[in-house]
Amino acid sequence: MVQPLVKHNIVKKRKKKFIRHQSDQFMRIARSSWRRPKGIDSRVRRRFKGQIKLANIGYGTNKKYRHVLPCGFLKFRVSNVKELEVLLMHNRTYAAEIAHNISKQKRRDILLRAAQLNIKVINAKAKITTEENE
């Protein structure tokens, strides 16, 4: 099995999601994503002690580790065998990910070619196995 060229220890500055201010009080915004508070008297915007944290650039991931998968590779989406050839020289940096709308037959062809080129396929088991006892 092909191993990544360099496997970094990925450091996350914050693992918890940033929640929207007062999202615990109102059901209509409970599941919504982060919005920056803009009120003139907002305690969160003014960064008072004990309030929820504001999302800012300081929480960003190091550029070297950004988009790196836990296995140490970067993703490269592939739709056919020809696109797989691009990874020939970069098989220790990038791993192929077969697009979701690819048929079983094409997937099999891509997997065979990837094995020849020594390219890691992230979702190799998807749509290949089927239930036989029906």
Image (tube, rainbow, N blue to C red):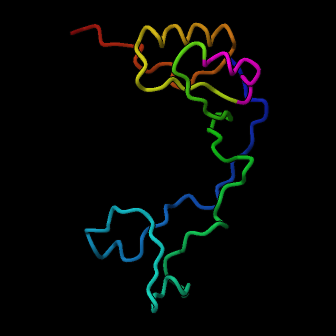
Magenta segment: does it hold 123?
Answer: no
For the C terminus, which image quadrant? Answer: top left
* Horizontal side of residue 124 vs 61, given as left or right: left
The residue positioned 46% from the left and 90% from the top of the image is: 40
Q: Position of residue 53 (x, y in %)?
A: 53, 74
Q: Is residue 89 above or below residue 44?
A: above
- Camera-nearest residue between 35 and 18: 35
Q: In the figure, residue 39 lies in which quadrant?
A: bottom left
Q: Residue furthest left?
A: 134
Q: Position of residue 91 (x, y in %)?
A: 72, 22
122 over 80 or under it: above or below: below
Chain part drawn in magenta: 83-93
Which residue is at the front of the view, 101 or 8?
Answer: 101
As drawn, the residue found furthest toward the front would be 82
Q: Residue 45, percent across and down?
A: 51, 83
For the N terminus, the quadrant is top right
Q: Residue at x 47, y 11 (%)?
A: 106
Q: Could you tell me which residue is drawn at 55 percent across and 12 percent down?
A: 111
Q: Residue at x 44, y 21 (%)?
A: 126
Instruction: Give how far across and how far down residue 86 sits, in percent.
Output: 68, 20
Tally the numbered discs: 0
Residue 112 appears left or right of 134? right
Q: From the viewer's perspective, is residue 110 above or below residue 89? A: above
Query: In the rendered view, would you say 15 is above or below 78?
Result: below
User: Residue 86 in magenta?
Assistant: yes
